[in-house]
Image (cartoon, helix red, strand yellow):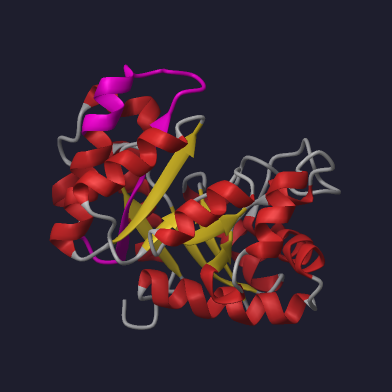
Amino acid sequence: MWTDTHCHLPAGEEADAMVAAAEAADVGRLVVVGTDVASSRHAIETAAAHPAVWATAGVHPHDASGGLDGIAELLGEPGVVAVGECGLDYHYDRSPRAVQRRVFAAQVGLALERDLALVVHTREAWDDTFAVLDSEGTPARTVFHCFTGGPAEAERALATGSVLSFSGIVSFKGATDVREAARHCPLDRLVVETDSPYLAPVPNRGQANRPAWLPLVGAAVAEAKGLAAEVVEHASTTTAAALFRLESS
């Protein structure tokens, strides 16, 4: 089966339908990701309703100005396997950069303190992202979600001991650097995600994404690496289970 290591789901019956559709498409595990207190609570509620769903709790860099109040308490809830998504986003600068760095550093600290995985979002902020991780200490189980760099950024991320997560971007015609990064990434150091409802893979690009389309992402990674999709399916699910400790959660 496949594991969607990063998705955002709607509430209620729509989420139930998406989980069922994912399972029918052989996507047997999902990690629903929080970006602030409210969405983190929703992720936890979704995980509680589905045995094959887990949650994260964290503050996205866009929301860093709102601080971290309430996140630490959520990290102790059943089904929570990671801190994040958190990090730096200098493309939109929706929170001041100094605030983003401070809130990111605090969440790195929470992951270390709680022995949880860390889900990193970085956009146009590679140097500062690595600087924060260097200063705080990269948690042993860290994933660069929706990896958008090329081979050079992949090498830097892998050198921290982190895992790379590839999204539907790997299937986009212009994403040559991302495919090259996937080609060079060791098979046991990568996972796959949809980041739904964003970044639907080809041939569904432009539509609202969904976890059931994860096999298309996996197939694109497999093509980039010159492997059978089943090989990437098994390896990425094994790595995801270790990254988030899904077997024991």
Q: Residue at x 61, y 57 (%)?
A: 18
Quadrant location of the C terminus?
Answer: bottom left
Disc tally is 0
* Residue extent of the magenta highlight: 76-102
Is 226 left, or right, of 153 in this rendering?
Answer: right
Q: Position of residue 135 (x, y in %)?
A: 21, 45
Q: Quadrant of residue 75?
A: bottom left
Quarter of the image where one finds residue 138: bottom left
Q: Please report the residue visible at 45 percent of the width from the left and 31 percent of the height from the top.
A: 125
The percent position of residue 117, horizontal first and vertical second, equals 32, 62
**Could you say which quadrant of the image residue 28 lies in?**
bottom right
Left or right, residue 128 beside residue 21: left
Q: Does residue 191 appear anywhere in the picture? A: yes
Residue 91, magenta (yes or no): yes
Q: Nearer the viewer, residue 162 or 7?
A: 162
Where residue 196 appears, x then y in whole percent?
60, 46
Decide if residue 76 is in sight here: no
In this rendering, would 73 be left or right of 205? left
Residue closer to the observer: 161 or 82: 161
Say whether residue 122 is magenta: no
Q: Residue at x 71, y 65 (%)?
A: 218
Q: Quadrant of the N terminus?
A: bottom right
At x 79%, y 41%, the residue is 205
Q: Position of residue 211 (x, y in %)?
A: 63, 57
